[in-house]
Amino acid sequence: MRPAKEQPFYHLLAENGESSYIAYVSQQNLDHDDSDEPVDHPAIASLFGPYHRGKYDLRPHYRH
C-alpha cells in the first residue's frame, strides 16, 4: 500500500538482524519499540548523548 502524502515522514535509525541503516518512513508505517533496550546503530553516538533512563537526549548541536 502506497503511503498517503498528507502525513509526516521521518528519517529513522533502523536495524535488523543483518545490518543498521537509515530509513525514510511514513507515519502510518511506524511501529512502537517497547523493548526499552538501547539502539545498536553506528550513528547514535554522533547524534545523541548516552542512553539514560530509557531514552537518548539529542546533542545540543542538533536542537533547533
Image: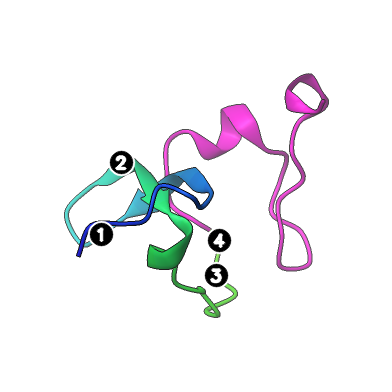
**Mark 4 element type:** loop
| Residue neighbourhood size for the residue with mark 1, other residues' Cα within 10 Å, grouped as few (<14), some (14–19), many (≥20) | few
In contact (CB < 8 Å): disc 3 and disc 4 = yes
| Residue neighbourhood size for the residue with mark 4, other residues' Cα within 10 Å, grouped as few (<14), some (14–19), many (≥20) | few
User: What amino acid type is highlighted by mark number 4?
Assistant: Pro
User: What amino acid type is highlighted by mark number 1?
Assistant: Asn
In contact (CB < 8 Å): disc 3 and disc 1 = no
Magenta range: 39-64
Q: Where is residue 15 in the image (x, y as percent from the top left)?
A: 32, 54
In contact (CB < 8 Å): disc 1 and disc 4 = no
In contact (CB < 8 Å): disc 2 and disc 1 = yes
Q: What residue sits 25% from the left and 59% below the top?
A: 16
Q: State the residue position of label 4.
A: 38
Q: Position of residue 59 (x, y in %)?
A: 76, 31
Q: Position of residue 3 (x, y in %)?
A: 32, 57
Of labels 1 and 4, earlier in sequence is: 1
Q: Decide if residue 51 is on the left or right side of residue 39.
A: right
Q: What residue sits 62% from the left and 31% below the top?
A: 47
Q: Nearer the viewer, mark 3 or mark 2?
A: 2
